[in-house]
Amino acid sequence: MSDATLVLGGSGFVGRHLVGRLVAAGRRVIVPTRQRERAKHLILLPTVDVVEADVHSEVVLARLTQRASVVVNLVGILHEPRRGGFDRVHVELARKLVFACRAAGVSRLLHMSALNADTKAPSRYLRSKGEAEAIVAASELAWTIFRPSVIFGREDSFLNLFATLEKFSPFIPLACAGAKFQPVYVGDVARAFEAAAADDSALLQRFVSPVALQEMMCRKPDGGPASLIGATVFRLVETASDLGDANESASIHAVFLRRVFGGHRRAGA
């Protein structure tokens, strides 16, 4: 086992932000991907080893975990391409990864879950996330679980969906216009994962977006918790209305950032 960090899902939306932070901190990072070409934005980073591999293979996972002291699982899907997809990607992968980590003596496992994940949740997505959490929590590994709400950033699939719809119609149909959510910035999620990798107080803890996530990362001088973002609650219709203040995807995210952070960006975000 080496001192590298293995990041499953490292070429994805959250992964690229986390990998960038780990590299900036001088960490060696291993990023497995189905097609190396898709991770070409990471290949040139000095301490990143991009490996073409199938992370659903037990043999591959055994080989990869032997090279790491910290393992991060960011792999997830929002929609099933076919029935059973959630179980394969969320549940079975978590089970295989836990087995590989235990066999390799991995010192820390950081797992991405989702807000309201529960084995008895009404949706298959949340049930599969809940089952994966249960596997990780029962693993006897040194684990940390993150349960963020909607994660936004320039490359996200959430705000960019609205931006795409806006190009084709001045009216955006909203099935649940009053639906509430607590958005969390992708840079903050990446910082939380980075901090948890070296913070023993994060062991065997579940962090929920946004406040608990931030309290783990930042402490006031007197030792008390300091929240980096507030528990801002939005309605879907309010988010859609932001399109009226922006005319392209990049400015849509700028408008949303101002709304979430009250007009102030933090240093290093």
Image: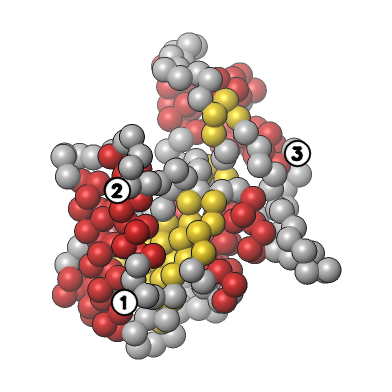
Rendered residue at 40%/46% (across/down): 117
Q: CA distance from mark 1 to mark 2?
A: 20 Å
Q: CA distance from mark 3 to mark 1?
A: 42 Å
Please identify the quarter of the rendering in which residue 7 is found.
bottom left
Q: CA distance from mark 2 to mark 3?
A: 37 Å
Of all residues, the one furthest to the right in this rendering is: 222
In this view, the residue in front, 143 or 158, is: 143
Rendered residue at 28%/69% (across/down): 97
**Quadrant in which the C terminus appears:** bottom right
Residue occupied by mark 2: 128
For label 1, the SS is: helix
For label 2, the SS is: helix
Residue occupied by mark 1: 101
Rendered residue at 32%/36% (across/down): 123
Left or right for 77, reference 82:
right
Inspect this view and state whether residue 19 appears: no
Q: Position of residue 85 (x, y in %)?
A: 20, 46
Task: Name the mark on residue 81.
Answer: none
Please identify the quarter of the rendering in which residue 104 is found.
bottom left
Residue occupied by mark 3: 263
In this view, the residue in front, 118 or 151, is: 118
* Relative to 141, residue 84 above or below: above
Left or right for 47, reference 218:
left
